Amino acid sequence: MRARASLAALLLAVLALASASAQEPRPSPARTPKRGGGLWGDVGFAYGRLHLTCTTCSSVVAANGTAVTVSAGFTPARTVLLGLQAQQWSSSGTALRQRVRSVLAVVQWYPWPATGFFLRGGNGIVRGPVAPQANGAQPSSTQGTGVGFALGMGYDVKLSQRLGLTVQAATHISALGDLTVGGQPATDVIAYVTRLGVAVVLR
């Protein structure tokens, strides 16, 4: 009898909690800001892979590494974010140091706000030591500065009213111009950095 009474009491408690939960207001399914004018920011960490080419290169240079991104800006509309993004990709496990750093003006757009899916694009200034494989030159790093364009996408997962996590994937294309590697020309150097990672988001 005691077991049955305890079970009945437990069932009544569960039903009471379920009823109370059903009466609570549901949060909006939208994961983007509800109105314009708010500030936003995110900090991300990612795996990144570099591909380096030029018109006078004997081969394509590929290297693995890590990328760190920091972004911040404002929200002019519910589905649009504007801001600046700083990114640094650094090679790992290679003898030659390579690093691609950039500062981009970015726009982030939510085509279907309730899903949390977004597209992000931007362009700006790129700088860093890279090591293209120029014909007839010994492998070495050289400093380059140019312009870059980035295109990516992601998915927001909301943790609280203002805090969330984002899964991001992006490709960053940088035109570093004509460089000199070990005394040999490396013309029209292009650096491609592809990254996949996560970010902590504050909105």
Image (cartoon, rainbow, N blue to C red):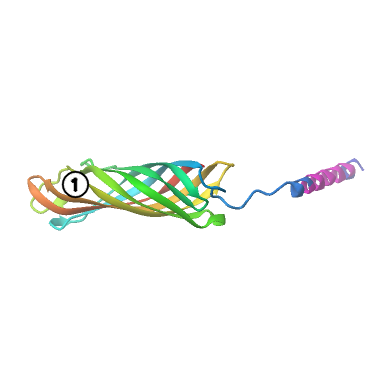
The residue closer to the viewer here, 177 or 138, is 177
Kindly give the residue lying farthest to the right in the view shown: 1
Q: Total number of numbered labels?
A: 1
Dominant SS in magenta: helix
Q: Is 153 on the left-hand or right-hand side of 141?
A: right
User: Is label 1 in a helix, a strand or a loop?
Assistant: loop
| Image x and y of residue 27, in percent | 65, 48
- Which residue type does callout 1 highlight? Ala
Q: Is 85 on the left-hand or right-hand side of 143?
A: right
| Image x and y of residue 2, in percent | 90, 40
Q: In the figure, 49 relative to 99: above or below? A: below
| Image x and y of residue 115, in percent | 55, 56
Q: In which quarter of the image is residue 70?
A: top left
Q: Looking at the rendering, in which quadrant would you find the N terminus?
A: top right
| Image x and y of residue 195, in percent | 36, 50
Residue at position x 34%, y 52% in the image? 150
User: Within the magenta stretch, is there residue 53?
Assistant: no
Q: For the residue carrying disc 1, how many other residues have a C-alpha within 10 Å: few (<14), some (14-19), or many (20+)?
A: many
Residue at position x 9%, y 45% in the image? 182
Q: What stretch is highlighted in magenta?
A: 5-19
Q: In the figure, 112 relative to 4: above or below? A: below
For disc 1, the marked residue is 131
Residue at position x 10%, y 54% in the image? 135
Q: Is 16 on the left-hand or right-hand side of 100?
A: right
